[in-house]
Amino acid sequence: MDLGLAGKVAVITGGTRGIGLATARLLAAEGADVVLVSRNADEAAQVAEDIASTTGRRALGVAANTTDDAAVAAMAAVVERDLGGAHILVNCAADPAGQKAVPVPSEAEWASLASHMDTKVMGYLRCARALLPAMRRAGWGRIINVSGLGARRTGDVVGTIRDVAVVALAKNLADELSGTGIAVTTVHPGMTRTEKVDAMLEARARAEVRTVGEVEAAMAQNVLMGRLPTAEDVAQVIAFLASPLSVTINGVAIDVGGGARGSINY
């Protein structure tokens, strides 16, 4: 299927690893020029060079901390100067939640919540605000926000609050932009096979004297697809949402966690 992405310009924050990297590679393979945004300038430049050499598309690596208004504005200026502005924004830059012991809600730390909200919610808004002028000018655009299934379950109050906030942000933007040709959506990954998760599975397998496959199967017991989704699996959905073919999808959140046993979301 031709997704109609040839000649589009896509900005992917958090684009050098995990879901962001898989998305950047797929969008470039589909004909889009891509901008990889990362806090690490050298890493962004290297990954961009790899994608350009593999796909033949233009690829830029841009260093920017999405919690910094000036840095995000400077990133948008580079995209405008070098590629004429962005048609697609994939917001994927976030600090992972649940990387240490999760406090009960009444003991959650304000500093932790504030940091996650600034990066994942306000950071997403900063990037959208900075790149929207070019989308408005083109009369077409796609903003896809990578949130998480923490929005639909309890157990990590900080993760839940930030992920729900991303959905609220996306829907409000979608309503604001109605009639402009710009759609805003959210995807909710669950536990996903990325570099970090792969390393965690390998470490657990060594500690428990089991195979990686056995450890993954145990973790995926409640995943209907029978295994953990890969970053590439998630990227396939994001690429469709980024395309003109997704014209009927706007303002909604889509689970991309492989299916959760026992959950009914409506």
Image (spheres, helix red, strand yellow):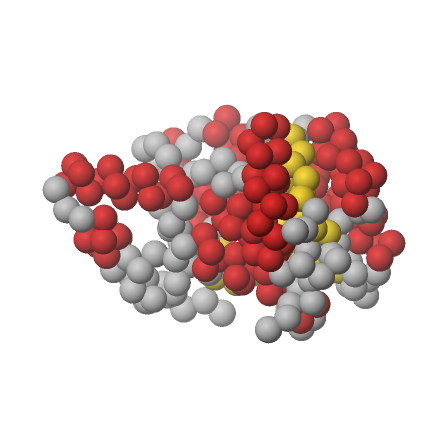
Q: Is residue 27 left or right of residue 260?
A: right
Q: On the rendered image, what quadrant is the N terminus found in?
A: bottom right
Q: Is residue 264 left or right of residue 211?
A: right
Residue in the picture at 84% in, 57% down: 138
Q: Could one spot residue 201 in this view of the protein? A: yes
Residue in the picture at 27% in, 43% down: 201
Foreground of the two, 217 or 36: 36
Q: From the top left corner, tell me how far across and down residue 9 is, in percent.
A: 73, 52
Q: Could one spot residue 165 in this view of the protein? A: no
Q: Is residue 107 left or right of residue 178?
A: left
Quadrant hosting residue 246: bottom right
Residue in the picture at 34% in, 66% down: 225
Residue most extreme to the right: 137
Q: From the top left corner, tell me how far across and down residue 159 is, in percent.
A: 45, 42
Quadrant hosting residue 8: bottom right
Number of numbered discs overlaid on the protein picture: 0
Q: From the top left corner, tell me how far across and down residue 199 is, in percent.
A: 32, 39
Foreground of the two, 82 or 162: 82
Residue most extreme to the left: 209
Q: From the top left corner, tell me how far across and down residue 38 is, in percent.
A: 59, 34
Residue in the picture at 79% in, 61% down: 140
- Above or below, 15 against 259 in this view is above
